[in-house]
Amino acid sequence: MRVSSRRKKQDPKGNSQNPFETKALVVIEQTKVRKKYIQGCKRTIKDLEKAKQEWEEYQSVDVPSYEKWYNQNFGSDLSQIREAHQKAIDLNSTLQEIRHWIMKKDISPYEAYKLVMDRKANPEKYRLLDEEEEARQREQKRKWKDKYGRDFFGEDENFDNEEDEEEEFFGNNREPSEEELKMMFEFFIQANPSIKSKMKDKGFYDFMFERFKEDVLGRKKTDSESNNESGKTTAEDRIKNIYRILVRKLHPDFQTEITPHMQSLWHEVQSAYKAKDLERLETILAISNIQTGDFSEEISVSQILNVQSEYKNQLKSLRAQIRKARKRVEWGFSKITNTQPLSKKIKTDLKLELNQHLFHIQQFEKQLQAWSKPMVRVSKNRYIYV
């Protein structure tokens, strides 16, 4: 129902020129509205099923077909690329290690090259030296901490006993006061910039503060404690009734064929029932009814709209995935009859990738060969070959 009213004509001073105002209750016929929304929901379900079929065909047919064809035709090229790539990584790692010892010991590239080659040839020889060096560095850190690891008041910094500090702040088994909770909540807001902007709304601030108090004190809000038992019982009965209906509709033992969607719905039913989420259970019931074509009067218009909204979100997400997949070479591969152009393009790309790795290998080997020659220092950062 809705209330219709006729606006009053007002003069420039704001006084009403029409002293009479009519109001009436208009009954809205829901049959046409329901029919319209049910048709929209059915269209969304149909579009979602079509998108799921496309995605399933891509995942189960196109991708495996492409991978099998790719490995059969380009296996040797891929092996060459893997070997070249690994060799480039090893050479670059050796160069980085030489640079490390040049900086650490202030020695020439030639001396660092000899050291690294010796370490690679005799790892056991340097293992004990490395362990002694690590122990020495740990001892230096300990001494530094003993000397300088104090705060401005001369007390040792210790972050391991946060629970003891909390007890000290609140006292033994004492609940924090309202002011202390406010202060803690402000710290919480500052530490979470994502919700800080929303706190300008007084209603949202009060709601979040009540939730924060529940978490800190470990108990429910006072109003929820003062709820009358009859209201609770009614909601609990409704939850149990809906759960029984959903068990008959979705439980695996009652189904001849279990689809992935039905499985996910069944898991949602379990979590919603444990959380006592009546609204979610009602929505799941509406989803299962609509899927089976049961648009009974028990399903309200708002529930139909909720179901349609949920399916639209799923459809939007799935279509976004399909748009990305369409740009990949695997999309529709199972329907391709002539793979020659694609094979030529892939061959060119693989050759280009191999040439890049070979170029890097050549550069790394050239640098290593230069550092392998004896050098003498002529200035602080300049060396010449002997």
Image (cartoon, rainbow, N blue to C red):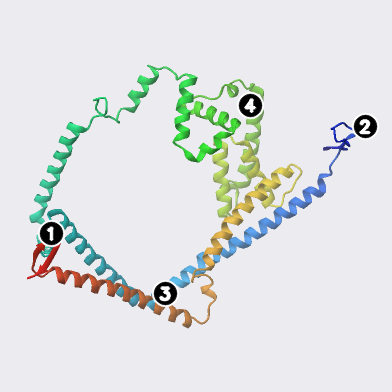
| Marks 1 & 2, CB-CB < 8 Å contact | no
State yes or no: discs 2 and 4 in contact (Cβ < 8 Å).
no
Classed neighbour count for the residue bearing mark 4: other residues with Cα under 10 Å, few (<14), some (14–19), many (≥20): few
On the rendered structure, is 143 left or right of 341?
Answer: left
Task: Choose the circle earlier in sequence order: 1 or 2.
Answer: 2
Which dot marks residue 380?
1
Q: Where is mark 2, residue-wise?
A: 20
- Identified at 47% across, 72% down, the residue is 65
Image quarter in which the N terminus is found: top right
The numbered mark, 2 or 3, whose residue comes first in the sequence reads 2
Q: Nearer the viewer, mark 2 or mark 3?
A: 2
Residue 233 in picture, x, y percent from top left = 64, 26
* Label 4 secondary element: helix
Image location of residue 129, percent across then percent down: 9, 50
Task: Give the residue type at disc 4.
Answer: Lys
The answer for how far apart the CA atoms under marks 2 and 4 are is: 46 Å
* Nearer mark to the viewer, of 4 and 1: 1
Q: Distance from label 4 to label 3 (Cα)?
A: 62 Å
Q: How many marks?
A: 4
Query: Which of the 4 image quadrants contains residue 101?
Result: bottom left
